[in-house]
Amino acid sequence: MASQFLLMFAFMLANTFPSLLLITIIAFAITCLFSIITLPVEFDASKRALVWLDQSGTAQGEEYEGAKDALKWAAMTYVSAALSSLVMLIFLILRYMGTNRE
């Protein structure tokens, strides 16, 4: 939540205080790195959940296939978050490079 306010102020004051935009870039770089690092953890958790469902017999047949699909798409939300974080970081870096040229 704090990053949203930091981003808003960074855009409003980018020309006046370019260092605020640099602080925002550093903050987004940390969140981007965290998003990318957690990807393998999420995929492993989904894989372990499927193994447990299979071994415990909790979900069989159609239910298992539905759970498999749901877990796959749940993991994909983390991929989406990591990609959007990376795109935002690239945008901020390009914006910072543009404000420093003036």
Image (tube, rainbow, N blue to C red):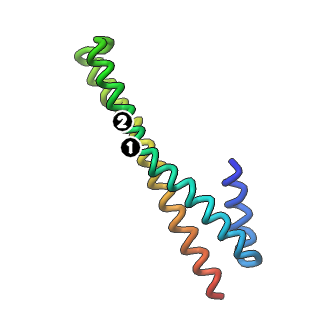
* Residue 7 in picture, x, y percent from top left: 67, 60
Question: Quick one: 12 or 81, which is closer to the camera?
Answer: 81
Q: Residues within 10 Å of mark 2 (few under 14, many from 20)?
A: few
Spot occupied by residue 72 in the image (x, y as percentages of width and height): 34, 35
Residue 77, label in figure = none
| Residue at mark 2 | 44
Query: Does 82 appear above or below 51?
Result: below
Residue at the (61%, 65%) spot, across then down: 25
- Which element is circle 1 on? helix
Residue type marked 1: Pro
Q: Residue at x 56, y 53 (%)?
A: 31
The residue at 44%/42% (across/down) is: 77
Percent of width and height locating residue 95: 59, 74
Tag 2, which secondary structure?
helix
Q: Marks 2/1: CA distance?
A: 6 Å
In the image, what residue occupies the spot 64% across and 83% down?
Answer: 100
Residue 16 in picture, x, y percent from top left? 76, 77
Q: Are marks 2 and 1 in contact (CB under 8 Å)?
A: yes
Which residue is outermost to the bottom?
A: 102
In the image, residue 61 sits, relative to residue 49, either above or below, namely above
Q: Quadrant of the C terminus?
A: bottom right
| Residue lying at the far left of the rendered structure | 61
